[in-house]
Amino acid sequence: VHLLEAGGMNLEDRSQDLYKSEMRGVFHQGTTEGRFRTFGGASTRWGGQLLSYPSEVFQKRDLFGNKGWPISETDIRAHYPEIFKLMGVNDLPFTDDLLERFKMRGALQSPDVRIRFSKFAPFLKRNLAKTIGRQCLASDHITVFFHANAISVDLDKEGARIKSVTARNYKGSSYRFKALEYIICTGTIEASRLLLSSTSVHPCGVGNLTDQVGRYFHDHLTVKAMGLGEQSKAIFAKYFSPYYVKNTLHSPKLEATVSLQKRLNLPEIMAHFFIHESENNKFALLRQTLVDLQRGKFAIKTAGQLPLLLSGAAQMAFALKVRGRRVISSQANISLNIETEQRPRPDSRIQISNKVNSVGIPETIIDWKISDEEGESMRRYALVVDKF
């Protein structure tokens, strides 16, 4: 296996600069702030949260006019045990079966709101550069090429098969890689750019004879629906603060049931809680220290931080061990966020520009569309969740 890594071992400005894009629609923050061109990619920065797809996502959904996925939930579920092991989480279900374990089923049943639980990977497991990345670097069967920016997918004369991939480094040197099989796993925007800019055989780009590559660009939309007051915080602490089981933190998600989706014409939509500790808080300091460890840049900035870190770690460990819940300070700000998928729109799309960047790849044009329907869906579901 030859693994072409566009970035280096650490985050570099010259690599991040290649994400520069022209915004023609709604400004898409994730284009520049949500992508990381480095070994480990977004896993060097993400929160480590895992949540399975609900069953109905794979099936035909009249709301979107689609025929369902060409793969089934069973096809993906077969890989869950391997993912759980890799990410260091337990094998408990994501479903509301956990409510029985937490003795909450009777209190939290609703025909409109379904509770599922995401799992959080431990901080030391979140950065994949430190887990499977290290295995790649040590393997006799895998060669990792750094700063290998793929600039084109080269087809055979008939345009039916890939014959090579061309990559270029920051010195301007180009290299051609040939293989029996090719896997493009560069993320939505980068994969679209690579296919659209590979025009040696098909002027419209690879796989784009029907003008579909880059269309239907969408993202999860999130809005802060409400902040929790003191009375609401007490209810949250009793029912919804994250649970800790077998070294894994489980966080509840309040999803719209299928019946509610049909009744209110809703897409996949959920509500979830966001906990923000104040910056000077020992729990915020502990979390930032763990984030630094995830990124490989751990450092205690002042001597006074050490006692706070130890105190926060001890209190957190006690709460997890004895209560089986995440500890939350009285100063924490807790909000309820609504998150929805978007309805598919062919005019919401990724295109390529006539401008090229420093390694000769066309810059991307992000024409992201958001409709009033998404806002209306959020408003409707916020009222349901508030009643719940």
Image (cartoon, rainbow, N blue to C red):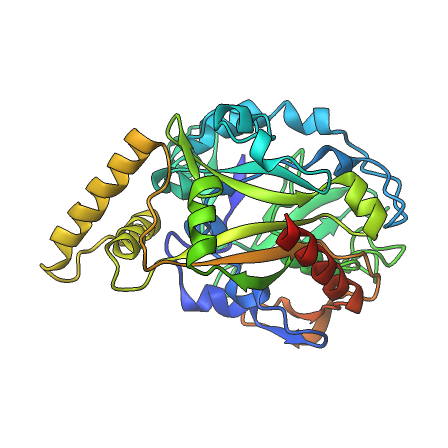
**Rendered-image quadrant of the N terminus:** top right
Q: Is residue 25 left or right of residue 225?
A: right
Q: Quadrant of residue 238?
A: top left
Coordinates of residue 53 in the picture (x, y in percent): 66, 37
Task: Report the front residue among 111 and 136.
Answer: 111
* Residue 367 visible in the shown view: yes
Task: Report the front residue among 183 and 224.
Answer: 224
Q: Residue furthest left?
A: 303
* Residue 159 visible in the shown view: no
Q: Is residue 13 left or right of residue 365?
A: left
Residue at 62% across / 66% down in the picture?
Answer: 361
Q: Is residue 279 left or right of residue 380?
A: left
Above or below residue 279? Residue 42 is above
Task: Report the front residue among 37 and 254.
Answer: 254
Coordinates of residue 211 in the picture (x, y in percent): 86, 59
Residue at 74% across / 57% down in the picture?
Answer: 342
Residue at 41% across / 54% down in the picture?
Answer: 8
Residue at 66% across / 57% down in the picture?
Answer: 382
Coordinates of residue 337 in the picture (x, y in percent): 57, 57
* Image mark count: 0
Q: Quadrant of residue 354?
A: bottom right
Q: Quadrant of residue 61?
A: top right
Coordinates of residue 232 in the picture (x, y in percent): 48, 54
Q: Is residue 282 left or right of residue 62?
A: left
